[in-house]
Amino acid sequence: MSKCLIVTGGGRGIGAEVSRKAAKQGYSVCVNFHRDQTSAQKLVRELEEDGANALAYQADVSREEEVEALFQTVEKDLGTPEVLVNNAGILDLQTRVDGMNAERIQRIFAVNVTGSFLCAREAVKRMSTRYGGKGGSIVNLSSGAAKYGSPGEYVDYAASKAAVDTLTTGLAREVAEEGIRVNAVRPGFIETEIHAAGGEPNRMERVRPMVPMKRVGKPREVADAVLWLLSDEASYITGTILDVSGGR
């Protein structure tokens, strides 16, 4: 029987590539989305046409009751989740810290941090041998911003991803004896739509010279790292944060 995987924010960008690669490896995949139902359903149809078992499900990961409903639905329709990719994340228009208000900061932390915690909590309740589970694997999506702080752009986003790094380290040690591995992938500059949300659609051209490899990454390159960490090939790896950043 195939393993059941939930990918939060799975309809576009890195999440969509993770969903595609996971489906090709035989996973049953839940593509979680918040607003972009069209992209999520289109992706699920693509996966199903290729023979995969897939489901699109709307949930705002910052809302506890919606996260609980997400996991309950997946458990009923696809099976007990054995793998989670905490990919959902948002940022806002580039600005300095002195231009940020509380509403913006709270919204970003609600999705990027609280959402990751809530999804990890529900996953642990189903995966942990402490609760009668068979074990599992969680991969959190961090960001190179957690290391560099994104000054003048979005320090709030960077701080939220630093919190994801700490969640990864702490949770990995907390559940290491319960059959669950917890790791993170920390992408560098990757060609996705998120940069437009920050107000600079062509940001990748500006930052390209900062990368030692002198190119930006593709979502599929991040997805490859995620799927490897989820796999049995990484069976002795937990609490690790893997940089996929072209050397930066």
Image (cartoon, rainbow, N blue to C red):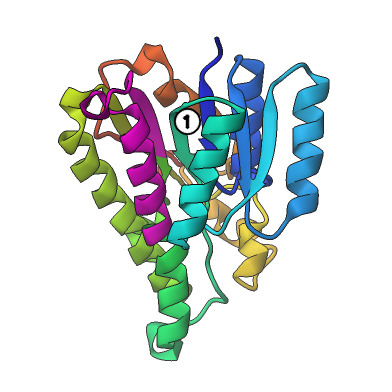
Q: Does residue 123 appear in this view? A: yes
Q: Residue at x 71, y 20 (%)?
A: 52
Q: Residue at x 28, y 23 (%)?
A: 132
Q: How many marks?
A: 1
Residue 211 shown in magenta: no
Q: Residue at x 19, y 28 (%)?
A: 176
- Write the start and end of the magenta stretch as one range: 114-139
Q: Which residue is mark 1?
A: 226
Left or right: residue 48 versus residue 122 is right
Q: Where is residue 59, by image quadrant?
A: bottom right
The quarter of the image holding the N terminus is: top right
In the displayed structure, would residue 149 be above or below residue 131?
below
Front one among 193 and 62: 62
> At label 1, which amino acid type do we have?
Val
Front one among 109 and 30: 30
* Mark 1, other Cα within 10 Å: few <14 / some 14–19 / many ≥20: many
Q: Secondary structure at mark 1?
A: helix
